[in-house]
Image: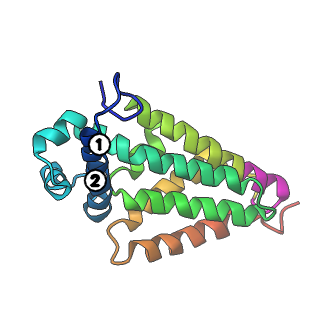
Amino acid sequence: MRETPSGAARPMRADARRNYERLLDQARIAFAEHGVDASLDDIARRAGVASGTLYRHFPTRLDLIEAVLGERVTELAELGRSLMDEPDTAVALATWLRAAINHALTFRGLSAAVMNSAIDGGDELVSAWHAETFAVGAALLDRARQSGTVTASAQDTDVLRMVGAIAWAAQDAQDPTAQADRLLTLLLNGLRPDPSQP
């Protein structure tokens, strides 16, 4: 069973909770710096705990990745839902797509899994994340289609796959954020309705 503050059978002791939070904090930093293949032993050392403590809380690398990313996926979904009230549907869509790409860039190595897991199969929790982010992205895209700021032919799956592809293509660039922004601009330009079409 994966041990989390909310999912453990018994409440954590105060010292165990502190260790858990320190490990999560250092994992966020390490994953952002080195991707999800960052050294677990180094994460434990930076958190000031023994490697055994890390493995008691997170028996596998995936357990640690899921604990870190779960919070970020929730934030991304909440951002998308808040943007449903943005009057400019093109701005709302662009803002969320940019946030989704930045999310994937922050945790290099997981962008393909998060964006494509529901299609390709895989970890159940990652699939649930995909479903949540897909639903939010699709809703924002639908609003943009309905308002006429995005071409009616834009398919949800195609657009969100391209978002994953942008993150993958930009992750090894000298300036990944700038590269991703250029590619996203090309995507957004391509989504505009063709004025020559009825």
**Rendered location of residue 145, percent (x, y):** 78, 54
In the displayed structure, does residue 74 sit left or right of residue 109? Answer: right
> The residue tagged with tag 2: helix, strand or loop?
helix
Q: Point out the stretch of residues depicted in magenta.
A: 141-150
Badge 1 marks a residue whose secondary structure is helix
Residue 173 in sight from this viewpoint = yes
Residue in front for this viewpoint, 184 or 40 = 40
Q: Is residue 125 left or right of residue 100?
A: left
* Mark 1 in CB contact with mark 2 (< 8 angstroms): yes
**Residue 135: image location, x then y, percent:** 63, 41
Label 1, label 2: how many angstroms apart (C-alpha)?
8 Å
Graded by Cα atoms within 10 Å as few (under 14), some (14 to 19) or many (20 or more), the crowding at tag 2 reads many
Q: Amino acid at mark 1?
A: Leu
Q: Residue tagged by mark 1?
A: 64
Circle 1: is it few (<14), some (14-19), or many (20+) Cα within 10 Å? many
Q: Nearer the viewer, residue 40 or 134?
A: 40
Q: Main secondary structure of the magenta part?
A: helix
Whole-percent x, y for residue 111 in the image: 41, 52
| Residue nearer the viewer, 195 or 38 | 38
Q: Is residue 177 above or below residue 89?
A: below
Report the residue at 50% width, 40% height from top: 130
Determine the residue positioned at 58% across, 71% down. 186
Q: Which corner quadrant holds the C terminus?
A: bottom right
